[in-house]
Amino acid sequence: MALLDGLDGPEDLRALRGPELDVLAAEIREFLVDRVSRTGGHLGPNLGVVELTLALHRVFDSPRDTLVFDTGHQSYVHKLLTGRRDFDRLRRRDGLSGYPSRAESAHDVVENSHASTALSWADGIAHARALSGDGDRTVVAVIGDGALTGGMAWEALNNIADGTPRRLVVVVNDNGRSYAPTVGGMMRRGVEGIIKELGLSYIGPVDGHDVAELEVALRGARAAGGPVVVHALTEKGRGYAPAEQDVADRFHAVGRIHPETGLPVVPSRFGWTGVFAEEVLALGRDRPDLVAITAAMRQPVGLAPFGEAFPGRIVDVGIAEQHAVTTAAGMAFAGLHPVVALYATFLNRAFDQVLMDAALHRAGITLVLDRAGITGDDGPSHHGMWDLAMLSLVPGLRLAAPRDGDTLRTALREAVDVRDAVTVLRYPKGALPEPVPAIEVRDGVDVLFHRDGPDPVLIVSVGAMAPTALAVAHALERGVTVVDPRWVLPVPSALVRLAGEHAQVAVIEDGLREGGVGAGVALAVRDVPVRAFGLPREFLAHGTRDEVLTSAGLTAERIAAELA
């Protein structure tokens, strides 16, 4: 990889000529397949933006000119071209982030892993520079992977088209997909017509894999001096046969794979998402009123089998979580029971809709939050650690945190039977734990462990923290009871009664300490001291789930020492 190894920064690109750029593009693709197959990561999106990123860095002067990638998982090539070639610990503790990161490089401005925000960022930066007299610097927003299905992107475009002069280039990386083919009338209508109707200058479509053609378009956009949209047509997974032949977008994000075949090195164990997928499909057969809603992620959240079985009863709204929740409320009013499946981190974007559109109207909808708690390698923007504290503010909302596959199945069936309130299920990323059976059930609260002894402590386990709670109990030399309420919001009255039988209460959760389940238990239990063991109110770096929990003090050893 002679050319790639010789690049120390974007300035080195400008001395290369056409044939050399083709060689460099091939070297970059070889590098990405080799490294990402070892670590896992977003492979398909980055293979599709090689030539586009080369052209961007040859035409614009980063970091003086600002590049913003939306979604940020398409920034691996940008990292390579800005001097970051150590991909051996990609998305691992102390390694490169899977998204742009200000901590890594002056070339990165926006972490941007929640889609559809880049145009607002770019518009704000360009406005500020125009006002401050620094208007000869160009801001470039690269938006793709379905991010134009998000409403915030169109709010920004509306503003960008207001006629105010500022140096802003919008590059639409049009590969026709996010996790799956992009949806919606605007996408079918086509980018060009919509952009021109807004009154914005438009260049394209151009071949997103022809560096020379891209450079001509980008230089023209830069010279215009005002907002311009450049429309580039690219192919996701370009240059890697397994990804080019894939129709299910399995190579959008991969674990460790064999680079020659694209097959997983270690087949995935059956996980939480798989249990949900099976159970919601079974419910769909029994309940013709059940409908499913996905925000451009039917495969990752487990709704693909439901969609195949009931194609008329699944709605993909694109990257539009706000609309997903409110349209679900409308469906509930009209007699259906919608199941809205999202990653927990993306529910943050729809809090107002949960509060004012769904809960205020007592809408019978079920929110299923995949990847709740600590997700690991995707880092601070993807940890699903905010949901418990955020949703605890919503009147009437009921939230279940299943501890294993059996309790997930039970909780989902209970949730979809509720017709006058928002119900929520949350569970983590990854493989299922071994079943954790209850030794008895007391007024709807599962008792997982009990030992008589002095100064008894009641350990309240929240969802997937059950193995940790049991390990704490075994480590203590005092009376101890471990319970799993399963439905943790609102705090069950049976749990309050149980607390009164103990000298102390400890709540273990993989959500925020402040405002989470532990805080709710402390408010409900007046006469017994309550300790909340959860995550700090901080943005936590990427790492494995165990690494992040250890750094946050959520280990059995640490908790047991504090309760001894």
Image (cartoon, rainbow, N blue to C red):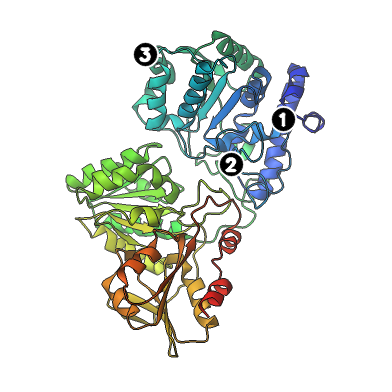
Give the farthest residue toward the bottom.
Answer: 453
- Quadrant of the rendered structure where residue 516 is? bottom left
State the residue position of label 3. 197
**Circle nearer the N terminus (2, 3):** 2
State the residue position of label 1. 26
Q: Is residue 375 left or right of residue 84?
A: left
Mark 2, secondary structure of its residue: loop
Amino acid type, callout 1:
Ala
Q: Nearer the viewer, mark 3 or mark 1?
A: 3
Q: Is residue 51 left or right of residue 73?
A: right
Q: CA distance from mark 2 to mark 1?
A: 18 Å
Quarter of the image with the N terminus is: top right
- The answer to whether 511 is drawn above or below residue 349 in the figure is below
Q: Residue at x 53, y 72 (%)?
A: 559
Amino acid type, callout 3:
Glu
Q: Residue at x 50, y 22 (%)?
A: 128
Regarding residue 272, the answer to whether it shows in the image is yes
